[in-house]
Image (cartoon, rainbow, N blue to C red):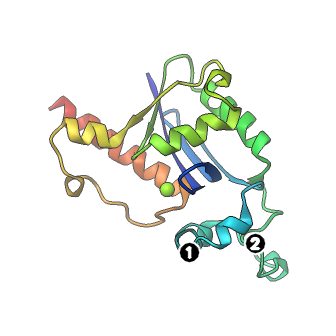
Amino acid sequence: MTAIDYDLEFLEDGRTIELISIGMVCDDGRHYYAVNRDMPVRKIRKNKWLMENVVPHLPKGQGDRRNHVPRSWLFDYADPVVKRRERIADEVMGFIRAAGPDIELWANYGAYDHVCLAQLWGRMIDLPEGVPMFTHDIQQERSRLGLSWDDLPQQEGGEHNALADARHNQTVRRWLAERAQK
Ligand SMILES: [Mg+2]
């Protein structure tokens, strides 16, 4: 079994879940991070929590470019991690399939993450072969082991950067796996 830990940042309004960014880390050492060029920027701008917690982590331009990215932009459209949603769908499918035939997806409070991930390819029935139909939840494993959230390793920084969150999920998931064996 090969595990892929992932995290998505998204806008959800009680009806829809729309991708902002995705981070994935695989047991085989690969990682993936992308920012959705097609994110609904107007709606995001009106969401105070996202503006304060998620948008600051999006690429803002490096070096000279930093001065050339208009302040009104939520992120630097020229950054290589910024991609069309369709391209992210293709690359994520490739990333997951490259992990082999026996894959587990893991996320933290991952129900919304799973739906947002699966909707990259459309309806439930459109899920590509090789992409698992469910995501294991760190919270379920924590509960099964009779642990509280405070018992778990704490994240040292970068919360709400999707890749940093995915890396922390990997740390916690591995820690739980060790506990489960004792
Ligand atoms: Mg996150």
Instruction: Give amino acid for label 2.
Output: Gly
Q: How far separated are the C-alphas under marks 1 and 2? A: 22 Å
x, y percent for residue 129: 64, 18
Are there few (<14), some (14-19), or many (20+) residues within 10 Å of tag 2? some
Q: Residue at x 75, y 72 (%)?
A: 61
Q: Earlier in the sequence, mark 1 or mark 2?
A: 1
| Residue drawn at (72%, 60%) of the image | 40
In the depicted structure, whether residue 94 falls above or below residue 117: above
Q: Is residue 142 left or right of residue 52?
A: left
- Which of 56 and 66 lies nearest the eye of the viewer? 56
Q: Position of residue 9 (x, y in %)?
A: 56, 55
Is 8 or 2 nearer to us in this picture?
8
Q: Which mark is residue 61?
A: 2
Q: What kind of residue is marked 1? A: Lys
Instruction: Give x and y (percent) for residue 106.
Output: 44, 37
Q: Count how many numbered circles sit on residues in the image.
A: 2
Residue 30 in view of the camera: no
Observer able to see residue 115: yes
Which residue is found at the position 78% from the left and 51% from the top? 83
Give the SS element for disc 2. Answer: loop
The reply, left or right, for residue 53 in relation to residue 65 is left
Mark 1 highlights which residue? 48
Residue 76 position in % (x across, y down): 77, 68
Secondary structure category for the residue under label 1? helix
The image quadrant that residue 62 belongs to is bottom right
* Label 1 vs label 2, nearer the camera: 1
Q: Is residue 122 above or below residue 51?
A: above
